[in-house]
Image (cartoon, rainbow, N blue to C red):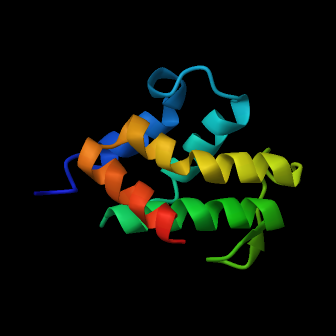
């Protein structure tokens, strides 16, 4: 059973248009989807999706891009910690909105384990 049902291009496109696939959320959720779309690696596996999302949120909260050690210039930097906590809890739901069912289940399992 494959967990790479969607191509990275499809996942990125859905993240960029997250409001279509995950309606009724706060604006920060959609901005995070667009930000995350640019941070996913080509070898997309559920654990990688989960880790990339977690590291992206951590970087936004601290305002530093861990990959390059540079400040992040993004509207999502400097928000109250409650927003980052809400976004963290939404990562499995975001995966459910933009990925295959099996892939999303593995993302949720990844988050249940951390």
- Residue 41 visible in the shown view: no
Q: Is residue 87 left or right of residue 46?
A: right
Question: Which image quarter holds the N terminus?
Answer: bottom left
Marker count (numbered):
0
Q: Residue at x 64, y 27 (%)?
A: 25
Which residue is pictured at 51% across the width and 53% down the height?
38
Front residue (pair 59, 108): 108
Location of residue 57 by image quarter:
bottom right
Residue 17 is situated, as x and y percent measured from the top left of the image, at 49, 29
Q: Is residue 103 left or right of residue 81?
A: left
Residue occupying the far front of the picture: 112
Q: Identify the residue at horizontal 83%, vertical 49% (top origin).
A: 82
- Horizontal and vertical percent for residue 89? 62, 50
Task: Give the position of the C terminus as an image quadrant.
Answer: bottom right
Seen in the image, is 14 located left or right of residue 114?
A: left
Q: Which residue does the image show at 79% across and 44% down from the upper left?
A: 75
Q: Is residue 17 visible?
A: yes
């Amino acid at each position: 059973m494959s967990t790479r049902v969607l191509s990275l291009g499809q996942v990125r496109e859905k993240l960029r248009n997250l409001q279509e696939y995950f309606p009724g959320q706060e604006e920060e959720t959609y901005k995070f989807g667009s930000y995350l779309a640019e941070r996913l690696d080509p070898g997309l596996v559920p654990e990688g999706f989960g880790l990339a999302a977690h590291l992206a949120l951590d970087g936004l909260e601290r305002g530093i891009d861990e990959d390059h050690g540079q400040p992040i210039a993004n509207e999502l930097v400097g928000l109250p910690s409650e927003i980052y906590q809400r976004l963290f809890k939404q990562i499995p739901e975001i995966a459910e909105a933009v990925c295959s069912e099996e892939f999303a289940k593995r993302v949720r399992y990844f988050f249940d384990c951390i």
